Amino acid sequence: MSPAVVLRSKFVTPRSSTFNDYINYMDREDAKQHVQMDVLSDKENDFDVFYQFMDYMDDEEKQGELFTSSKDRLNTKEKQTVKEQFQLAQQNESPMWQDVLSFDNEWLRKQGLYNADTHAVDETKMRNVVRETMQTMLQAEGMQQSAIWTASLHYNTDNIHVHVATIEPHPTRERMNVLDKESNTWHEEYRAKRKPKTLDKMKSKVANVILDRAHERNKVDELLRGTIRHKKENNISLSSFRKTETLFKEAMNQLPEDRKQWRYGYQSINEARPYIDEITEIYLEQFHPEEFQALKTKLDEEVDVMKEMYGEGSDYQQYKNTKLDDLKKRMGNAILTEMRAVDKEERVSDFKQKIAIRQFHALEKENQQSFFQRYNGKVNPSLHVSVIRLKQAMRKTFHDFKRERHMDEFDRMVEKD
């Protein structure tokens, strides 16, 4: 299956002839070449004709206009201003980033953005797609305040394309040493390579803006939250449930002594995590079989959408995997919250038992002293010692109570997560 959306990206250095050609052709109106470009190819030369895409902006066949983040169409003066910004960027040694978004026309038609009979594209929506995508890129790369870009939409080829060029008139990126292979000499350049996650975010933004799957994904999130909320509202005890009781105890035995580390994402609970995951599976199968099946169905629907959009070679399963991991994390923390409650109850029980033993021994000693007082027929001057020791035991009780209260506050913080 061919992807419905392809993003190809490259950068050129200010010393490149392509940078000069782009500036020279930015406001050229006489050339009407219909450049063919294979956006699926890995050949770098496919981008050598990048600058010629601006030739489409005034084509009599109604090709897309040159536009920017704030302008749908540039007049002659505005084009000159943008051209000067690109020239300044080249003088200041800024790289030029080149992005090509290519769309499958039939897929755009199904999304209501393309009319195959009139060959018309919803340019307003497409410009919005580009603007939000570029805003995502600039934010991810920390260039919101320093970069500008220009783009053009054209659709007289087999696939509708949007071409974007981005520069920093006053570069902000760090500088690095680069080896010139032709001259075998080193020189400094601004770092131009963007993070792989940035390109992933750009593709995701295209999908989110065009498909508008917010309603469907809200249903997924509601199913996720519902399973956790059901456990809390119905006070389901997995520590005493027959199918999870043994796993619950085994998991607690593997947890670290520091209760503040009892969080699903912490490495310190690695030994206990397999038991917690198994408890989660049993809980979902026992208490939420229909909801869990509905969740998997919704996730599979999203996978199909992503597969159609990005193609077989893409990581179209990522959304589903991320959501299932999120479910395991949420359920894991809910189980760990119950484990802290069980642990606290056991410690409180032990604490009360110790207090009772202390009080018993104190009273026993006091009774012994009273017996010897009566037997010897005199008052024991050390009676106040027993009172002091009893007070010490009660003070320890108070400190233990404060420690338990701090654990309560921590539990409330976790439950709000």
Image: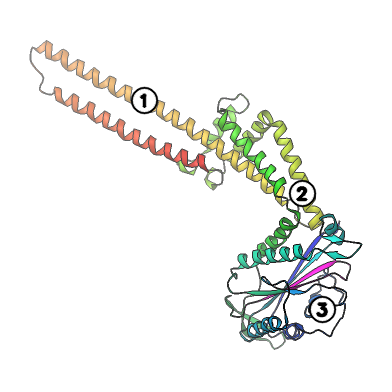
Q: Label 3 amino acid?
A: Asp
Please, is residue 269 above or below residue 374 in the view? below
In percent of width and height, residue 69 lies at 67, 70
In percent of width and height, residue 21 lies at 76, 85
Question: Who's the residue at 84% across and 55% down the image?
Answer: 110
How packed mark 3 is, by other alpha carbons closer than 10 Å (few <14, some 14-19, many 20 or more), is some
As drawn, which residue projects farthest toward the left?
A: 378
Q: Which of the two labelled residues, at mark 1 and mark 3, occupies the earlier sequence position?
A: 3
Q: Would you name the residue on which mark 1 appears?
A: 352
Q: Which of the two labelled residues, at mark 1 and mark 2, occupies the earlier sequence position?
A: 2
Q: Between 144 and 120, which is closer to the camera in this rendering?
A: 120
Question: Who's the residue at 75% across and 62% down the image?
Answer: 125
How packed mark 1 is, by other alpha carbons closer than 10 Å (few <14, some 14-19, many 20 or more), is few
Q: Would you name the residue on which mark 2 appears?
A: 303
- Which range of residues does the magenta coloring cover? 151-168
Q: Label 2 amino acid?
A: Val
Q: Would you name the residue on which mark 3 appears?
A: 58
